Image (tube, grey):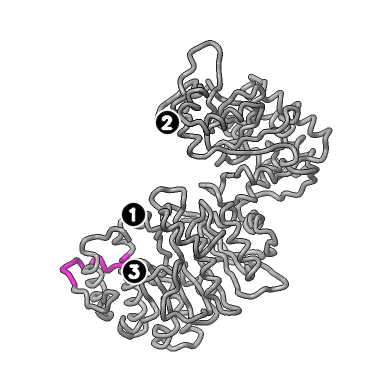
Amino acid sequence: MNTFPVHLPQTLATVAELKGGPQFLDIHGNVVETGNLSPKIAQEPLLAETYEKLLTSRTRKTAGAFYTPLDVAEKLTEVAVLEGPVVDPACGGGIFLLSAAKRLAALGGDPKEIARNQIFGSDIDEWAVAVCRWELAHWAGIEPEEVQGVTKADPLTEKPSGWPDQFGAVIGNPPFLSQLHRTTSRTADRREELRSRYGNLLKAYTNEAWLFLAMGLELLAPQGQMLLIQPLSLIGARDASEIRKKILTEASLVGLWVDQSTVFIGHTEVCAPIVRNSLIDKKQVVRYTGRTIQEVSSVEQPSDPEDWGGLIADLMGLPSTEFTGSGQVEHKATTTAGFRQHFYGLVPGVSEQKEEEIKHPLITTAMVDPFNCLWGQKSVQFDGKKWERPVVDLNLVAEFDKAVGEWMRKRQRPKLLISTQTKVIEVVVDEKGDWVPLTPLIIVEPQEEDLWALAASLSSPIVSALAARQTAGAARSVSRITLSARQLLNLPLPSDKQALNEAIEIAQFIHKSSDRNLERSWLLFGETINRAYGTKNKDLISWWWNRHPEARKQNK
């Protein structure tokens, strides 16, 4: 932790005393003096829960520390823990370890022996470690210094001394450290430290919570089970692919908990894979949902690490995706996307369009409407400013950053632009080839004669459903689709050329139309392009239309 309330140790010691447990000790075994604080602060059932409430929201966010409610931890532990010893490699205040200790006691163990020899944990926060030790000691009727298996350490980089070689169960809720946010992104030193241990498992946007899965696999005894709560992005994020592959090839995915309720602060959507350290021939994944950890129907374990979306597709309300395709986007086009340097490299060259002749319009994600570019029709934000008709002088861009200028000039060709973080795939067609795309737009560059064929194909209901399935959980919201340029290359193309040509005509009509109510045309397009993919699934059409921007316009 970076910051703590000034009187945190004294407050914890006071609450411990009020709960009637043993003396509260720091991690070095020293008694922490109590303070003169109100008994109201001891209202939480557990010291661990009191500790969480004492932390500021900023501290929790920076550390990625959002503690698990006791009822959830207890139910998940019942599912995952079959035998000891048990370890929580990011134990926090010990809610999971306390639940595991109770579980082992219910299986016939002695509480004192369990707390001394069957429960292990670590955390980088010394006061969380102290709270965890006290919590276990209070439950078992022993002193905190007897709980020697819980220590201050970072197990992602080095296994704590004193831990057994193998564990019967690995459980917990490791910190969610997204690399998309400045407050939780890794330093260069941290990145190199993790890369030296995890190799290609560490990608640019690897959430450190995922690495705990890799580390946990190393700790599991044969037939042991692991359950670690994860951001839902584990299911579909591109940079989690190697982690998913490791689980499928080295162990068996036997269960999955998915929660889209309000278990965690901020309504964070989470999951928890249940992994067994054995290779099972018939692999069924038992699924659980919600705060009550309710068991629902089982599904087969995916064989492809890129298809974990199928584990939760029906739970998310995604339609079935049976189709007949002919090739993939990569057979007809290349794809690319800019990075931060391309965003900032444009700044010196952007101005408001003043002359009658429009040169190189700047296109942002906010301007992308299905088959309709909104440049000049709505104001947008760029570089902290509001723009009405932004254009780009590529010569000025090249003077500022030669590489960015060259990259932008290569994009001056007929192309498609695709927005990200949308509910369906949204495509606009740059027939003249003079638009300048702003990051994070995805750029698709086919042969000119294939522009509208690809635009129609990528705008189809079936392709949106496939993309939603493939990237389930990877976007900011579970209802959004976020594709990378590489993932887009793997999307299928239709097999029925006649139906495709009919769909292209409808798409071009929509593109040129000034009619404000195009619902009938859009639904006809959806049905026609789906027919090109060999499907007449009406549920698929309904799902797609309910998420479509045009439908939202009609409902306003």
Marks 1 and 2, how far apart in space? 29 Å
Q: Amino acid at mark 3?
A: Ala
Is 114 left, or right, of 337 in this rendering?
left
**Does the magenta run of residues contain 41?**
yes
Q: Does the CB distance between marks 2 and 3 fall below 8 Å?
A: no
| Foreground tag (2 vs 3) | 2
Q: Does the CB distance between marks 1 and 2 fall below 8 Å?
A: no
Tell which residue pokes out farthest to the left in this image: 36
Q: Which residue is mark 2?
A: 383
Marks 3 and 1, how far apart in space? 16 Å
Q: Which image quarter holds the N terminus?
A: bottom left
Dot 2: what SS? loop
Dot 3: what SS? helix
Question: Looking at the image, how many numbered discs can be counted on the residues?
Answer: 3
Q: Amino acid at mark 1?
A: Ser
Marks 3 and 1, the one that precedes in the sequence: 1
Dot 1: what SS? helix
Mark number, residue 166: none
Residue 43 visible somewhere in the drawing: yes
Q: Amino acid at mark 2?
A: Asp
Is 371 left, or right, of 29 in this rendering?
right
Q: Which residue is mark 3?
A: 128
Where is residue 514 drawn, in percent x and y? 63, 19
Q: Which image quarter holds the C terminus?
A: top right
369 vs 296, nearest the viewer = 369
Q: Which residue is mark 1?
A: 57
> Would you call the spot at circle 2 few (<14 residues within 10 Å), some (14-19), or many (20 or more)?
few
Marks 1 and 2, the one that precedes in the sequence: 1
533 vs 548, nearest the viewer = 533
Q: Which residues are magenta?
A: 34-51
